[in-house]
Structure formats: structure tokens, C-alpha cells
Amino acid sequence: TSFKGFASKFIIGSGKNYIQFVHVKDVVQGFLKTLDSQASIGRTYIISQARPYTYEEVYGILAKIFRQKEPRWRVPRGLAKLMMLPIEGFSLLIGRENFLYRRETVNSVTSDRAFRIDRARKDLGYEPAYDLPEGMAETVAPSGAPGHGTSGGTRRDFLKACRKLARRVAEGAAGRCTISPKMAERLLGVPRI
């Protein structure tokens, strides 16, 4: 991952729109807590970080991680969508689509995407272990920086946990499958708080 590309020089829209992230280990934590909770049956939960961040804050965090300047230029939404049209068309034509250069991405980054996790906290006891700066530093740190390369490991951890859970259910765990804190620790490693 790089923060040196052309797209990192601009903020589309005001930069005040909210976005909310979640670390893959927090997703796994929420998944395991849902499996282990009677209250979760028939319910839907939002598993995310505790608070949303503005795009300005996100770019500031990335700039610190990559030791780059924060974007200075703002591109209005309408102009950004107009600029994306030929790029999007050309990308489709040559078969190399890039989600950064799509009109839907402009819509996404100029809309608020902020959620409440109150139900997951109340019903499941879910509490995110990662905040955005820590999670991004671990996931997208440049080569040689602390945390470099761990994003693949966290994806592997998630897939490994899912496979183990599926295996347990397939081996005869009829109905509900209980995950103890010790089992979750074996699957995911010791939680970092």
C-alpha cells in the first residue's frame, strides 16, 4: 500500500464526511461473540470501531504513517465525478478497473458512513480492541516500518478461525457452537487492548 500516488494529493469534497473502519481482528471478535450469544439469535449487529473519523482525519493518519504531507487540495464532488468518467471508461476498455477511479467511489467518499455499535456492546459485550491509528499502522505500514506485513497475517487469522469454526460444526456440533475465551485466544491470539 502506498500513500504516494496521485490520488493521495486530493480530498474529494469537503473532507468532513464520516467513515468508520474496523480491524479484521475486531470483526473476528464480533463474529465469535455472536456465535456464543443467545441474544444474537435473529438479530443483526454492526461490528465496527467505536467512532467514525472524517476523511481529513483519515488522510492525516495516513500522512503520519507514510511520513508524507497531508492533501492540500479539495476537488468538488461534481468535478471529481466528471474527471472520473473518461478514466473509468478507459479502465473498463482495457480491463484494468481501479476502484479509486470510479464515480461510485466519489459518491462514497462524499457521503457519511457512520454507525452505532450500541446493540453489539449491550447484547454481545463487544468492544473494539483497535482504534483507527493503531489498526492502520499495523495494516498499511510501509516496508520496514513497525507492523509491515501484518495485514496478510490478520486475513489468514480470520480465515483460519472461520475454517476451525466450520470444522467444529461439521464434526457434530449440532445447533449452537460455544466458543470459550480460551478457544478464541487459541484461534486469534491474545487480544491487544
Image (spheres, rainbow, N blue to C red):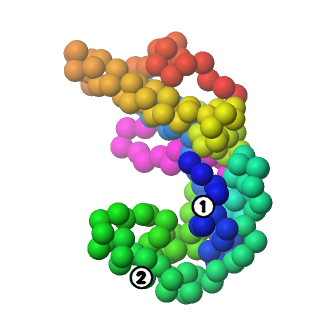
Q: Is residue 53 magenta?
A: yes
| Relative to 152, residue 95 above or below | below
What residue appears at the point 64 percent right and 55 percent down from the top-left corner? 3
User: Can you say whether 132 is above or below 36 in the image?
Assistant: below
Residue 46 in view = yes
Task: Provide residue 159's location: percent of width, then percent of height.
Answer: 38, 30
Magenta residues span 40-54
**Amino acid of disc 2:** Pro
Label 2: how many Cα within 10 Å (few below 14, some 14–19, many 20+): few
- Where is residue 160 drawn, in percent x and y? 39, 24
Residue 177 lies in quadrant: top left
Instruction: Report which residue position mark 2 lands on.
Output: 86
Q: Which labelled disc corresponds to residue 5?
A: 1
Q: Left or right: where does residue 167 sit relative to residue 117? A: left
Query: Which mark is drawn over residue 96?
Result: none
Residue at the (58%, 74%) spot, across then down: 110
Image x and y of residue 31, in percent:
45, 34
Q: Nearer the viewer, residue 120 or 2?
A: 2
Q: Residue at x 69, y 52 (%)?
A: 62
Figure quadrant of residue 191: top right
Q: Is residue 115 magenta?
A: no
Vertical relation: 74 (above or below) 26: below
Q: Of marks 1 and 2, which one's residue comes earlier in the chain?
A: 1
117 vs 53, nearest the viewer = 53
Which secondary structure, mark 1?
loop
172 with respect to 68 (left or right): left
Q: Main secondary structure of the magenta part?
A: loop
Mark 1, other Cα within 10 Å: few <14 / some 14–19 / many ≥20: few
Q: Amino acid at mark 1?
A: Gly
Please say if 102 is above or below 53.
below
